Image (spheres, rainbow, N blue to C red):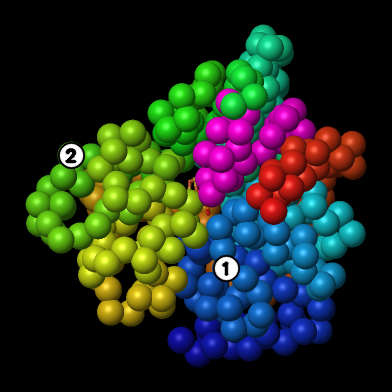
Amino acid sequence: TDYAEQLKTEIRLLLKQKNAVLVAHYYTDPVIQALAEETGGCISDSLEMARFGRDAEQQTLVVAGVKFMGETAKILSPEKTVIMPTLEATCSLDLGCPIKEFSAFCDAHPDRIVVVYANTSAAVKARADWVVTSSIALEIVEHLDSQGKKIIWGPDRHLGAYIQKETGADMLMWDGECIVHDEFSAQALLKAKHLHPDAAVLVHPESPASVVEMADAVGSTSQLIKAATELPNQKFIVATDKGIFYKMKQLSPNKEFIEAPTAGNGATCRSCAHCPWMAMNGLEAMRDALVSHEGKEIFVDETLRLRALVPLDRMLGFAA
Ligand code: 13P
Ligand code: SF4
């Protein structure tokens, strides 16, 4: 629409004026992803977002995603201004892992090393020995397991179960889930596979084990996008947030991408394969955040930041 075009023009201008860069996740609206790409920002998975934000020359980072991504950016670059279209965009994993309870859980098992998913608050990261994202979780747990470490894993139980199965590591799990991926249904996927027998199945490991078991490729958003370009299939059934189709279609315009079915349909699914918090990142909110940072800027307490930086740096060092 004209209004959307006007907002994009304003954002392009404001980014230049404010020496700011857009860092967007693959689950955000295609309009946002295209804008990030066009203006020299990035669209990527959680690990790449953290790296890009840390290495960016610009003084201001506009993080389009959910709150933990903004916090991670601020923890890594305290000298930068980090703003988000909305600070209300949270994550069911973050919400389901309050620091007080998680900390007590860790205290009860002092013999275990604490590994947390990036989808957590700064406070939970500060309590952890390691932070991981889905693209590096397997390698890091493998590494810790090879050193004989016993692990506390939080908060995503599906990702945890997948890693435990792959590595055989001793992992004590926190009981959390992503409301988007938890809803993919193995039963419905089986039917979809019968309808499309030539399709490869791509699954994000935040999905239930029964769905992961049916996958031809399992991985983070960027790993699934890569698999879609590399696998010879012409058709893919994709079990992750539908925001990812933007990049998949861009890289493989002649391939067909089909949404994996959720347990409910239209009226009954909770998220219907799109994260409600990612969806809060709109053009208007982004323009407003660039005009006035008020209520849109990420701050992390300095003591907490320094503690959370340790496991984050550990992850980035391992991934390098
Ligand atoms: P990745 O992009 O790291 O795979 O993360 C997925 C996710 O759920 C982010 O909210
Ligand atoms: Fe959290 Fe799931 Fe949304 Fe990602 S898709 S932000 S894991 S609720």
Asked whether residue 266 appears in the rendered view, the answer is: yes
Mark with earlier residue (2, 1): 1
Q: Amino acid at mark 1?
A: Ile
Q: Residue at (87%, 40%) from the top-left corner?
A: 306
Label 2 neighbour load within 10 Å: few <14, some 14-19, many 20+: few
Q: Residue at (69%, 34%) from the top-left corner?
A: 130
For residue 241, side relative to residue 11 (left or right): left
Label 1 neighbour load within 10 Å: few <14, some 14-19, many 20+: many
Q: Position of residue 272 (x, y in %)?
A: 33, 51
As measured in the structure, the alpha-carbon distance from the residue carrying label 2 to the one carrying label 1 is: 32 Å
Quarter occupied by residue 115: top right
Q: Amino acid at mark 2?
A: Gln
Between 126 and 99, which is closer to the camera in this rendering? 126
Q: Please name the residue that numbered disc 1 is placed on.
A: 43
Q: Please name the residue that numbered disc 2 is placed on.
A: 187
| Residue 303 highlighted magenta (yes or no) | no
Q: Position of residue 266 (x, y in %)?
A: 25, 53
Q: What residue span does the magenta drawing correspond to?
A: 124-145
Report whether the residue tagged 1 is closer than 8 Å to ligand 1: no
Question: Which label number is shown at residue 194?
Answer: none
Q: Residue at (33%, 79%) from the top-left corner?
A: 253
Between 60 and 131, which is closer to the camera in this rendering? 131
| Residue 132 highlighted magenta (yes or no) | yes
Whether residue 83 is situated above or below residue 134 in the rendered picture: below
Q: Position of residue 63 (x, y in %)?
A: 67, 62
Q: Residue at (77%, 33%) from the top-left corner?
A: 126
Asked whether residue 94 appears in the rendered view, the answer is: no
Whether residue 93 is situated above or below residue 27 in the rendered picture: above
